[in-house]
Image (cartoon, rainbow, N blue to C red):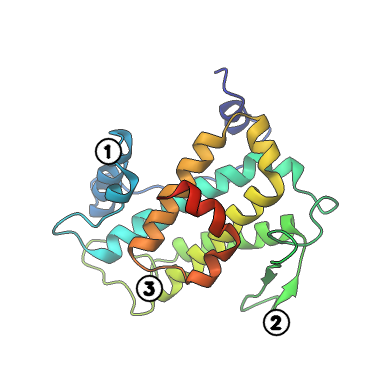
Amino acid sequence: MSNPFLKQVFNKDKTFRPKRKFEPGTQRFELHKKAQASLNAGLDLKLAVQLPPGEDLNDWVAVHVVDFFNRVNLIYGTIGDGCTEQSCPIMSGGPKYEYRWQDEHQFRKPTALSAPRYMDLLMDWIEVQINNEELFPTHVGTPFPKNFLQVVKKILSRLFRVFVHVYIHHFDRIAQMGSEAHVNTCYKHFYYFVKEFGLIDTKELEPLKEMTARMCH
């Protein structure tokens, strides 16, 4: 295991959250396998994100949201030791973009927080959403709620902010670990998916606009 990125990922001292998995034998598990097979076969990412014929859009979206949560969580975990209260006192994406945290409990008004505190709250919040059976039903035949895509848009917009912070403030760490290709592939996959289904507002994508234009043709 010579790749430093993989060493970081499997370092037992690192505290990554447990991955959310799909139950074998379920429709969601089969879709997950189908999505992974496309990626492993080296299929063009623009094609890999398209809804397979005959599949349900909400199921396809749910599978990808969970997968992106796991991947982005892992990426942030690998640079987490360099993202501290001191180095990143504000959750931002360069001088022009500052992200404030808001939720239904502790922070009812948008609040400026350090990047690591924001990330902790964000990952906890997403974990609650994707483990909520009413929002992300796991039993075949249980319908998705009417506000499912609305919640998904919020989850993905907030996950995008992790990419913004990592690329703008911690890319040297990613490069030092030799993991640019891995992170770039994750980003492209994420970007093509949200564009395919219109799941993030264009103005939210603005901070990485130039990089995206170069990377995602």
Which residue is nearer to you in this view: 69 or 129? 69
Inter-mark Cα distance, 2 to 1 = 43 Å
Q: Please name the residue that numbered disc 2 is placed on.
A: 109
State the image coordinates of residue 90 (x, y, percent, origin top left).
78, 62
State the image coordinates of residue 26 (x, y, percent, origin top left).
24, 51
Query: Which element carries disc 3, helix, strand or loop?
Result: helix
Count of marks placed on residues: 3
Judge left or right: residue 146 versus residue 201: left
Sequence-wise, which precedes: disc 2 or disc 3?
2
Sequence-wise, which precedes: disc 1 or disc 3?
1
Contact flag, marks 2 and 3 (Cβ < 8 Å): no
Q: Residue furthest left?
A: 54
State the image coordinates of residue 19 (x, y, percent, origin top left).
48, 45
Which quarter of the rendering shows the N terminus? top right
Q: Please name the residue that numbered disc 1 is placed on.
A: 37
Q: Nearer the viewer, mark 1 or mark 3?
A: 1
Which amino acid, mark 1? Ala
Label drawn at residue 148: 3
Judge left or right: residue 34 versus residue 91: left
Which residue is nearer to you in this view: 129 or 82? 82
Residue 87 sits above or below residue 36 on the image: below
Mark 3 Cα-neighbour bin, 10 Å: few <14, some 14–19, many ≥20? some
Mark 1 Cα-neighbour bin, 10 Å: few <14, some 14–19, many ≥20? few
Which residue is nearer to you in this view: 24 or 189? 189
Which amino acid, mark 3? Phe
Residue 34 sits above or below residue 197 on the image: above
Residue at the image point whose x is 79% and y is 54% from the top: 88
Inter-mark Cα distance, 2 to 3 = 23 Å
